[in-house]
Image: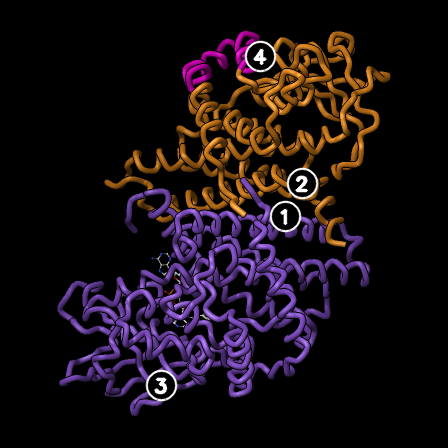
Amino acid sequence: MDFQLSDDQRALRAGVRELLAGRFGRDRMRAALDAGTGVDRALWRELGEAGFFALRLPEAEGGVGLGLPEAVLLFEEAGRSLLPGPLIATHLAAGPVKGAAQGEAVVAVLDAGQPVAHLGEADALLVLGPGDGRGVPEESATVREAATVREAADPVRSIDPFTPLWRVAEPAEAGEPLPRDGRLRTEGALLAAAEQLGSAARTTEMAVQHAGAREQFGAPIGSFQAVKHLCAGMLVRAELARCAVYAAAVTADPVEIAGAKLLADDAAVRNARDCLQVHGGMGFTWESDVHLHLKRAWLRSGQWLTAAAAEEVLAGNLC
Amino acid sequence: MDLAYTEEEQEFRARLRAWLATVLPALPAKPAPDDWPGRRAYDTAWQRALYDAGYAGLHWPVDAGGRGATPTQHLIFLEETERAGAPYVGANFVGLLHAGPTIAAEGTAEQRARWLPPVLRGDEIWCQGFSEPEAGSDLAALRTRAVRDGDHYVVSGSKIWTSHAEVADWCELLVRTDPAAPRHRGISWLAMEMDAPGVTVRPLRTLAGSTEFAEMFLDEVRVPVSHRVGAENDGWRVTMVTLSFERGTAFVGEVVACRRTLAALAAEARRNGRWDDPVLRRGLGRLNAEFRALWRLTQWNVSEAQRAGSGGVPGTGGSVFKLRYSHARQELYEAAAEVLGADSADLDREWALDRLSSLSYTIAAGTSQIQRNIVAERILGLPKGR
Ligand SMILES: Cc1cc2nc3c(=O)[nH]c(=O)nc-3n(C[C@H](O)[C@H](O)[C@H](O)COP(=O)(O)OP(=O)(O)OC[C@H]3O[C@@H](n4cnc5c(N)ncnc54)[C@H](O)[C@@H]3O)c2cc1C
């Protein structure tokens, strides 16, 4: 047993962090926010070139041939940097959907009853079958062209400025059946958990940084125990979620993935809220990045596997 | 990220499992909670059995009489013994997890030879005399005085919350040897015989009704200077070197036990119909995520220790674990009370007493507030202050 990152995994993570810092650092992130552009096609292709989408495709099919543990490290970095776009759906569609692996196509996801994120910019849609989060094959998972679905969809004024949402009337008739093993929902849930983890770790750093710099009553606010204990609680949540997410990536066990999603959702949302509190009035501004983490964390909590569904999976596992 | 055990580790597990299967059925019945001589005999007999089979002091260094096992082997040992329902470390706790490792790390060759083998064989029991009425979280405020008189210290003062004091042979005692020095620099670590003249032990009753700990009054107790471990006035450092061991691995087996309890709770809820309440059912599901993750966190910490080549789990990772685990354990037994419904008021029902004892977890071995201070200051690097 050696439940730590390998040297290769560390290098991979450092590489992605560097790529994202260079290509989607804070200035560009804020510029993208102001411009209101959801998916930057040029960046999308760069992510494709870097292997973001083809990571788990076999090398024989033009992929990188790595596994879920590596994918989780990538998506953790995406979550840290607030990288927008339907990253998970496009990653899952690499292979079956032409152009997805290279970042030429933008693939969004349609999950019955949920608004569709980035429908406006998408080329194709993964349509999830009902599934039960336990890895039972989603027989009806299909791929559809985005344009036809968009015709019958209404844009929603999204709570997250980085994630345009569309309300879709009813999942229309079946599209092309998807030649995958029916693990889309669980894998999507794991990758969303990884993004939540990245966000939770980032808001912890932001809170600690601010608590060390901001002074009141003649002392850094981080010397006050009420603030210090908020920060400690954030770290504990993030680190427990980290172990849950990484282990779930190694075992790919649907019950463990449900646990990882539950804990990572909790860590992302609650850490963003505590981070906001530590920032005081600044935390309530548009200018601060805290709200961007919180809003995205809220959205992700409702995607792929909700808390209620995850808890049922985990309860069912006890009997 | 590798969760698979090596062939060697699997063999170690298989051998241990086979051994447990032969010895556990022959164990005597567990003594009653208030039968202290019975508890001592039970706990030490188990330690003796471990010793005879070569499992005593598994994680101790070889030159201290241990087996020099890797942190992963120690983890497997704790997991398997708990899973098989083997006795808990019990009265051997301080000897094996704190006083022993302290002597191994800081003692002279003579001191190691005198004190370590009896701990490993289960011949001698230790207790921990650190806390005082005026020195709890602020341990460095301790006042128990030790005055040099020839080749002895004369010790006077009082200790409190001393677990297993009634049955202990030895006490690892923190005393003040230089009242004029800065607080942390005037403390020494002594091994005190519990039957020395001047030692009075008064059991304290816990909220669970039993007497798990005691007050200790020390009235001019003579302790040989040769029983001091480490230099005079260096006792604070001597103690801190090994304190993280206590936080790191003390609760590993308990996480395994909690997962078993959780499964039993689910079965009971199914039986009595409370499973149909989605709030209760989903709460149990959330606890499943919690304890699974705590187990993964343990594997993470152990792997980190293994890579660092250190004997114990790092203190900081231990604090993250202890904070979350102590809280989760309390939540588990709150859930048990919900599953039991009105029967939770019956102390003879399973889980009722565990619910009470779980309340000490956020206090003993450093309160949750103190652990948060440690996490914030030592891991996150936030400034010290009020
Ligand atoms: C079951 C059990 C077994 C024990 N066994 C032993 C033993 O064998 N040997 C031994 O020496 N001791 C033992 N203890 C003692 C234990 O270590 C102390 O109880 C613990 O360190 C807290 O000290 P205290 O009880 O004096 O509480 P206090 O220190 O008075 O704390 C009271 C409250 O104030 C809070 N507080 C105190 N200081 C701070 C601070 N700086 N910042 C924020 N909050 C603060 C605490 O978190 C707590 O909530 C045992 C305790 C229990 C419950």
Camera-side residue: B225 or A209? B225
Left or right of B192 in this view: A122:
right
In the image, what residue occupies the spot 20% across and 82% down? B153
Please name the residue that numbered disc 2 is placed on: A258
Q: Which one is in front in this view, the residue at disc 4 or the one at disc 3? A: 3
Residue A266 point in image, percent of width and height: 57, 40
Observer-side mark, 1 or 3, equals 3
Whether the residues at callouts 2 and 1 have beta carbons within 8 Å, the answer is yes
- Amino acid type assigned to the residue bearing label 4 in the image: Val
Q: Colour of chain B?
A: purple
Q: Kindly indicate the quadrant of the structure image that contains residue B221.
A: bottom left
Query: Which quadrant of the rendered structure holds the C terminus of chain A?
Result: bottom right
The residue identified by callout 1 is B289
Q: Is residue B255 above or below residue B169?
A: above
Q: Is residue A41 above or below residue B63?
A: above
Q: Which residue is mark 3?
A: B194
